[in-house]
Amino acid sequence: MNMPTEHKLDTVSLYINGQRAAASGTRYGDVTNPATGAIIRQVPFCTAADIDAAVRAATAALPEWSAWPAVRRSRVLQKFLQLLQANAKELAGLITEENGKTFADALGEVQRGSEVVEFACGIPQLLKGEYSENVGPGVDCHTLRQSVGVCAGITPFNFPVMVPLWMLPVAIACGNTFILKPSEKDPSPALRMAELLKEAGLPDGVFNVVHGDKEAVDAILAHPGISAVSFVGSTPIARYIYETGAKHGKRVQALGGAKNHMVVLPDADVDYAADAVIGAAYGAAGERCMAISVVVAVGDVADALVQTIRHKARKVRVGPGMQEGVDMGPLVTCAHRDKVAGYIESGVAEGATLALDGRGVSIPGHDQGFFLGTTLFDHVTPQMKIYREEIFGPVLSVVRVETLEAAIDLVNAQAFANGAAIFTSSGGAARRFEEEVQIGMVGVNVPIPVPLAFYSFGGWKNSLFGDLHVHGVEAVKFYTRTKAVTTRWPNQSTPKPSFSMPVLG
Ligand code: NAD
């Protein structure tokens, strides 16, 4: 964070009431290109006045938008889906430029986000209520699902397109208006999506983008005009958002951090499991909430497994995300790269075996980029900091245990509970694992079990504060309020209204 600099860098705009807007404050953040280390633009940090301007636009747009027939709202989303596909390369380029992940991975991100738009296009079906005839003599009952009002989304740096798309398509399909505060580290793709939504026919004010840090987030949490807040980010902030939003009377879903374990049993195909873990641990430089950060090697599979993972991890090609043939890009910021490198030092100091050290990797022509190579620790114990804390980088820990029971106990003892996977050829072992792990999303021979858009996504324990997951039918529940209507049309045979509690049926 710093003041505007002398050299004129582009400033990322806000997007309010269908147009780009400038922020009112004086604080700005630097947006860097992680592959080069260069500051490429600045992002304004919004004040409470900017948040209020966005809320006023979203409030003004709400009555008309929520009254549109669901099928008409769906048509806007269908057009948006086409535009996302037509502009996927541009969006992916922006992701790679500000986040660092490879272009292929960024294209995959746009695709996975688009799938939520596809799901939201079915909103007329999803909003259907219930109806019961004759719940009493001449009395019928039905339910409506109505919009919640102005909703806000606060999102992390690691999926600047996909995570906003976990929220906004379902929110607006349900008739709400929406304010997005993307990560200040990679804010530009959100703005491009706002323009595509307008091009798709979305009325002004239905979708707005603000930027900033804690000041902007606190203004969102305290604003009486915002009814619901969706958050995705780290656990301490998720807990804060949940508690503060609830204190202000808002509906909140707050998804937090993760420490995803992959249990490998002795009967697993070692080569297959090692291939799976390479992508799951080092893809997007480990900056995925569903990344595998711990392998639990059960029994005598450990030596062969560690050796195979090490062999494959050394072959991962590190470099700038736009370069052909690169598997893994840089980390998002210099500070984050240094923090992850600090965890490697800590693991060594605490006595874990450093089987592969990613520090000191150098990429010709990109000396200032935020790179770190693939790192592998063996003989990690649950007491070590590298085991207990979320590292969010290309650092994989191997913990050795003797039995499946011990592996399940280990998974269940941790505070995070986003995802977990088991690799085995035993149906019985897989079934036991599936039944006993206290985890939101489980994979059987699938390392990153991310549910598709028509299922809901979310963890347990410190990985999710709130009751409802994102996307899928749980999102429709989050972004709507149920209204139950009881109806009687009196005629001559209808009993007269009674003075005491009526006995129906
Ligand atoms: P973060 O918590 O630092 O930031 C997330 C959002 O909160 C950003 O918009 C940021 O501006 C805002 N924020 C940061 N500090 C704040 C504060 N003190 N008060 C109010 N708001 C604040 O997370 P990040 O580093 O951007 O993203 C990485 C984290 O997100 C990891 O922990 C990862 O596991 C998690 N994540 C979780 C999921 C999931 O589905 N559970 C998905 C993606 C990322």
Image: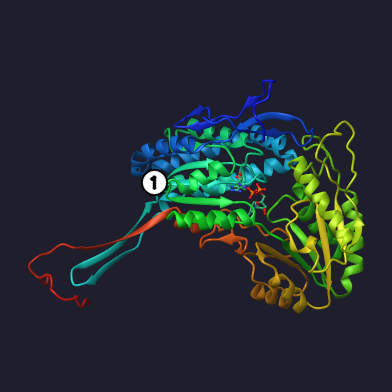
Q: Residues within 10 Å of mark 1 (few under 14, many from 20)?
A: many
Vertical placement of residue 390 versus 60, above or below? below
Task: Note whether residue 452 is visible.
Answer: yes
Q: x%, y% of residue 285?
A: 77, 48
Going 83% across and 42% down the picture, which residue do you hit? 371
Vertical placement of residue 497 versus 178, above or below? below
Q: Tag 1's secondary structure? A: helix
Horizontal side of 35 relative to 116 (left or right) equals right
Q: Name the quadrant of the N terminus.
A: top right
Going 64% across and 26% down the picture, which residue do you hit? 4
Quadrant of the rendered image containing residue 480: bottom left
Quadrant of the rendered image containing residue 390: bottom right
Q: Name the residue under label 1.
A: 70
Q: x%, y% of residue 358?
A: 88, 49
- Amino acid carrying label 1: it is Ala
Q: Nearer the viewer, residue 156 or 282?
A: 156
Horizontal side of 73 relative to 278 (left or right) equals left
Q: Nearer the viewer, residue 99 or 112?
A: 99
Q: How many labels does the image show?
A: 1
Going 90% across and 33% down the picture, which residue do you hit? 364
- Residue labelled 1 has its Cβ within 8 Å of some atom of ligand 1: no
Quadrant of the rendered image containing residue 435: bottom right
Q: x%, y% of residue 310?
A: 90, 57
Going 72% across and 43% down the picture, which residue do you hit? 105
Q: x%, y% of residue 432?
A: 69, 77
Color style of the picture: rainbow
